[in-house]
Each structure stands twice: as structure tokens, then as C-alpha cells.
Image (cartoon, rainbow, N blue to C red):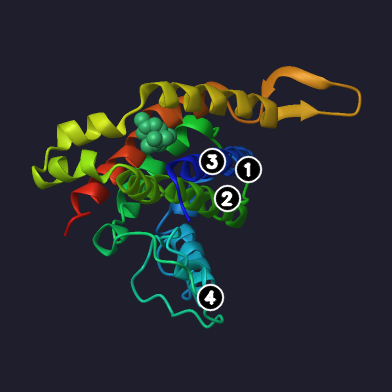
Amino acid sequence: QYTVDSARACLVRQEDTIIFALIERAKFPLNSPTYNHTFTSISQIQGSLLHFFIRNTEAIQSKAGRYTNPEEIPFFPENLPPSVAPYYPSSEFLHSAGALININKDIWKLYFHVLLPMFVASGDDGNYAQTAAADLTLLQAISRRIHYGRFVAEAKFRETPQIFESLIRAKDRKALMKVLTLESIEKMVVKRVEKKAMVFGHEVSLEHVKEGTYKVDPSVVSLLYQKWLIPLTKNVELEYLLRRLD
Ligand SMILES: O=C(O)C(=O)C[C@]1(C(=O)O)C=C[C@@H](O)C=C1
């Protein structure tokens, strides 16, 4: 079962996943042909190599059961094949109306237009398939983190329903956002991810740990959390709560 504390612990663990995924994507330059809709001339591939890669990977993952887990949300939910994996009964923690919140289209646009240019170098090294794979891993990690706001919100609601119910009925977004916001925790998250990016991103050899060079810029990681990941998680929390009494 989820509690506010266990949900927070999960967000902390997801930081590791996101930072390693950032490091893996930052290994490659922008590699813009990956995203070019006219680059692939093979008739089997329609659209960009990235679209081809992600649609097909999501189809396989869907068959293998990835999206039977409510923590996972696909980027292309249209026409996904059903899971063929054995059914595993999971407890239904989320309220059904809010469980369906999906802001992956916004995350997609944000990722390619704003985030990616912040932490990859310009250039082209020809590793387009590897680039698409690294993008998908990172997009999935970011999407899971932001949509995890549904679980955080449900846990908060269950701990103190009396605080939330009247605000939800009044659709008082401003007051709800105020209750959901804990500035001290946000500051801690932003500082911690910067530190993790330093620790995980060091060049390590047997002789020494090289100071001052990082595989992904720690200040970019903290900015990413401060400006986008935390605010979007809070938006998901808010939208979830607004549907909580439906
Ligand atoms: O820890 C919480 O209470 C959350 O709601 C998560 C989170 C975050 O995104 O990290 C979001 C809002 C709070 O202001 C603090 C942190």
C-alpha cells in the first residue's frame, strides 16, 4: 500500500533512474536525423526513426504487460496490443477518474523542444538507434515521475480527507495547490538531485575520482527538477484531486 512517506521514498529512488537516464542520453550529441520525418526512406518506416522506435518498443512492452501497471503510461496509447502476460492481481489504489490523467503529449513536446537542447551537445555521431533508445528510457522515467503525482495525491487525500474535500467541492485550485506545496521538501529535492548528479556523473578510475567534470551538468539537473518536474508533478496532483470526488 502507498502512504505519503512511501510515495516520497519512491520519488527519491526515481531520481536515480532519471539522472542515470540523463547521463546515458548526454553521451550522444543531438543526432537530429533521429527526429527527422523525411530522413528514413525505408518503406517500412513511416515518420521519424524515433517514432518508429518508440511505437514498436511500446507495442512489445505492452504485450509483455508493462502497461497493466498503473504507474506506467504509454506515449502512443492508440492501437497498443493487449498484454499476453499472465495476469498479476494488483490492488487498485487510485481513484478511477484521476487514474486516467495522461499528460504525455505535453511531456513529449517539453522534452524535445526545451529539455533536450539543455543537456545534449550539438552534433551528429550517427548513433541514431541508440539515441532513440536513450530518449525513450529517459522519457519513460520522466513521465513515470510526473504521473506518480497521482499516487502522491491519493496518499495525501487518504491521510487527511477532511482537509481536501471542501476545497475539491469548491474547485479551489489555488487553495489546493497551497496545501499540496511543501517548499522545504522541494528545496531538498532540488539540492539532492544536484548532489546525485555530481556523485553519479564523476569520472571514476581506480586511482582517483576526477573532480569538476560531470557526465551531465548538475546545475541543469536541478533546474530541470525545479522548473519542470516538480511543477508538473504538482499539476498532476491537483488535476487528480479535482476528479477525486467524481
Ligand atoms: O513530497 C510531496 O509532498 C510531493 O507532493 C512531491 C513534490 C515533488 O514533486 O517532489 C511536489 C510537491 C511538494 O511541494 C513537494 C514535493
Compute the Cα span from label 2 to label 1: 6 Å
Q: Indicate the secondary structure of the residue bearing disc 2.
A: helix
Respond yes or no on whether mark 4 lies under 8 Å from ligand 1. no
Which percent across, then down, holds residue 49? 49, 60
Respond yes or no on whether mark 1 lies under 8 Å from ligand 1. no
Marks 1 and 4: in contact by CB < 8 Å? no
**Residue under circle 1?**
24
Which percent across, then down, holds residue 149? 37, 46
Marks 1 and 2: in contact by CB < 8 Å? yes
For disc 2, the neighbor class at 10 Å (few under 14, some 14 to 19, many from 20) is many
What's under tag 4, amino acid-wise?
Tyr
For disc 1, the neighbor class at 10 Å (few under 14, some 14 to 19, many from 20) is some
- Look at the image and tell me whether residue 81 can be seen: yes
Marks 4 and 3: in contact by CB < 8 Å? no
Q: Residue at x 56, y 25 (%)?
A: 192
Which percent across, then down, holds residue 57? 53, 67
**Residue under circle 3?**
9
Q: Residue at x 33, y 34 (%)?
A: 231
**Residue under circle 2?**
134
**Residue under circle 4?**
88
What's under tag 1, amino acid-wise?
Glu
- Name which of mark 3 and mark 4 comes first in the sequence: 3
Q: Indicate the secondary structure of the residue bearing disc 3.
A: helix
The quarter of the image holding the C terminus is bottom left
Residue 53 numbered tag = none
Which percent across, then down, holds residue 33? 49, 51
What's under tag 2, amino acid-wise?
Ala
Q: Residue at x 48, y 40 (%)?
A: 5
Q: Is residue 174 left or right of residue 85?
A: left
- Name which of mark 2 and mark 1 comes first in the sequence: 1
- Name which of mark 2 and mark 3 comes first in the sequence: 3
Between circles 2 and 4, the one closer to the viewer is: 4
